[in-house]
């Protein structure tokens, strides 16, 4: 499948800074119904690709109508949208009406935070063409436009999680080796939010009964781990977001400023970046921060985890 040639963002070079900002160059920069939330990096059709999740609000802003991911080829700057869909009967599809607050991309498995409904797993090997009314429905749209078409990725499993699943992120060894586990966290306006790490269960198996760890950090939005270092993003209203670092039960705020309205986090070992994104209209962007700037170095490159023999 070829990526769309419509460029929905481009790198904005910033003189004197080590960060890279990617800005949406379309209505996505200001849209007030679609909001970007989750982010991760993976391989799509053999190319290093950034995935950004979005959810769509209704006109009143009280209900979720649909969700999608945008896959961005980091070298070419091309992108494609995939609606997140759930099976609805034998052949039909219905929109995934979830907040999609975080992503963990593992091979063809795309894990998406579904808040009070746990972790939803979508199969990137099961991408379907959709047209007409079904395509509009998966976008949460009632527009009678003709010739509507798109693509959708279909939910394969629902995983129950022992805490409210506001966001999730991947885990890496200190040398950059991908681990078979993810971290799941809950957003709260007070400092009682918790994080739990677990091996990703196979199929539709439930998450194992683990004890979530309180972090003492309010308004957490994203989490990743490299070695013993856990990184957490914290939103602060219309002020720059904050990055916290350290063991999960002893996080300390760093001097690294995140974008206003920051959301999820993702580690990009190959690119040497910590990625995050901002959700607010007019301030909406994707930001890459060099891992060395957040105190992480010595990663040798991305390698898949392989369980020990026997």
Image: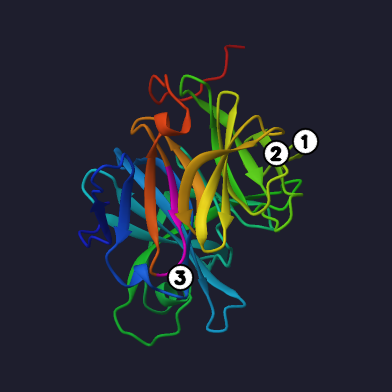
Q: CA distance from mark 1 to mark 2?
A: 7 Å
Q: Is residue 31 above or below residue 222?
A: below
Q: Which residue is mark 2?
A: 196
Residue at image x 62%, y 12%? 310
Which label was assigned to residue 210? 1
Q: How many marks?
A: 3
Residue 19, quarter of picture = top left
- Horizontal arrangement in the rendering, residue 270 relative to residue 60 (left or right): left
Query: Dot 1 surroundings within 10 Å: few (below 14), some, or many (20 or more)?
Result: few
Q: CA distance from mark 3 to mark 1?
A: 34 Å
Q: Position of residue 209 (x, y in %)?
A: 79, 37
Q: Is residue 202 visible?
A: no
- Horizontal arrangement in the rendering, residue 51 relative to residue 91 (left or right): left
Q: Earlier in the sequence, mark 1 or mark 2?
A: 2
Q: CA distance from mark 2 to mark 3?
A: 29 Å
Numbered disc 1: secondary structure: loop
Residue at image x 55%, y 27%? 179
Residue found at the very far top of the displayed protein: 309
Residue found at the very far bottom of the displayed protein: 144
Give the extent of the magenta segment.
275-281
Q: Nearer the viewer, residue 64 or 19?
A: 19
Which label was assigned to residue 34? 3
């Amino acid at each position: 499948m070829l990526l769309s040639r419509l460029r929905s963002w481009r790198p904005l070079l910033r003189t004197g800074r080590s960060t890279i900002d990617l800005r949406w160059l379309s209505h996505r920069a200001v849209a007030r119904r679609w909001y970007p939330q989750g982010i991760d990096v993976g391989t799509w059709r053999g190319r290093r690709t950034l995935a950004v999740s979005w959810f769509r609000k209704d006109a009143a802003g009280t209900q979720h109508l649909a969700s999608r991911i945008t896959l961005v080829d980091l070298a070419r700057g091309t992108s494609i949208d995939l609606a997140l869909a759930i099976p609805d009967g034998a052949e039909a599809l219905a929109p995934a009406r979830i907040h999609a607050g975080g992503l963990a991309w593992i091979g063809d498995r795309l894990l998406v935070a579904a808040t009070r409904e746990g972790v939803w797993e979508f199969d990137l090997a099961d991408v379907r063409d959709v047209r007409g009314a079904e395509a509009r429905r998966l976008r949460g749209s009632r527009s009678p436009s003709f010739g509507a078409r798109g693509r959708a990725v279909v939910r394969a499993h629902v995983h129950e999680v022992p805490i409210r699943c506001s966001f999730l992120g991947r885990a890496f060894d200190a040398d950059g080796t991908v681990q078979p586990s993810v971290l799941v966290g809950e957003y709260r306006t007070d400092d009682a939010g918790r994080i739990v790490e677990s091996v990703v269960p196979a199929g539709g198996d439930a998450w194992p009964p683990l004890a979530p760890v309180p972090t003492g950090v309010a308004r957490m939005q994203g989490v990743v781990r490299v070695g013993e270092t856990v990184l957490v993003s914290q939103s602060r209203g219309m002020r720059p977001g904050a990055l916290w670092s350290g063991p999960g039960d002893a996080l300390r705020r760093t001097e690294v400023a995140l974008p206003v309205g920051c959301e999820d986090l993702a580690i990009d070992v190959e690119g040497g970046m910590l990625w995050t994104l901002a959700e607010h209209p007019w301030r909406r962007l994707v930001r890459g921060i060099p891992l060395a700037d957040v105190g992480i170095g010595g990663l040798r490159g991305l390698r898949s985890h392989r369980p020990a023999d026997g």
